[in-house]
Amino acid sequence: MTETTLTKLDPDQAIDIAYDIFLEMAGENLDPADILLFNLQFEERGAVEFVETAEDWDQEIGVLIDPNEYAEVWIGLVNEQDEMDDIFAKFLISHQEEDRQYHIIWKK
């Protein structure tokens, strides 16, 4: 009997996956004004951050998740205090390589 151990995404991998998905899907999911803002401001203020996986995703996606099985990445703009104050998308990405699942909460 072999027990499969979960190989967790490292932060750089999770960030790359989230950013690729973001670029692919932002046009369909964000307001045109937000896309313009993101494009104009990303070089100076843009951030893609690997954050601790929140416990409250079930309220957003309707499914209870095990935070240890997912990475969470935020994409947005930071303010002068280097805090992300304008979040365009929050990603939940599973660590399962064969069956990579993700959920996205887009800015409304």
Image: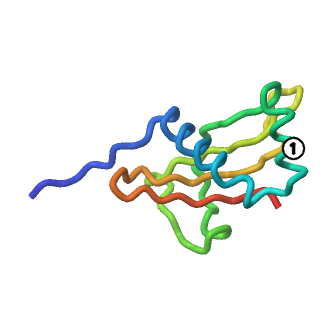
Residue labelled with disc 1: 36
The N terminus lies in which quarter of the figure?
bottom left
Q: Position of residue 87 (x, y in %)?
A: 78, 47
Please state if 73 lies on the left or on the right of 7 as rendered: right
Residue name at image x 32 percent, y 49 percent? 6
Front in this rendered view, residue 68 or 27: 27
Residue type highlighted by circle 1: Leu
User: Against 74, is 78 above or below?
Assistant: above
Please state if 69 lies on the left or on the right of 22 as rendered: left
Front in this rendered view, residue 71 or 97: 97
Residue name at image x 51 percent, y 32 percent? 12
Residue name at image x 43 percent, y 41 percent? 9
Q: Position of residue 58 (x, y in %)?
A: 60, 69
User: Residue 85 falls in which quadrant of the image?
Assistant: top right
The C terminus lies in which quarter of the figure?
bottom right
Q: Residue furthest left?
A: 1
Residue name at image x 60 percent, y 58 percent? 55
Mark 1 residue element: helix
Q: Position of residue 32 (x, y in %)?
A: 86, 54
User: Against 20, is 58 above or below?
Assistant: below
Front in this rendered view, residue 18 or 8: 18
User: Against 60, is 74 above or below?
Assistant: above
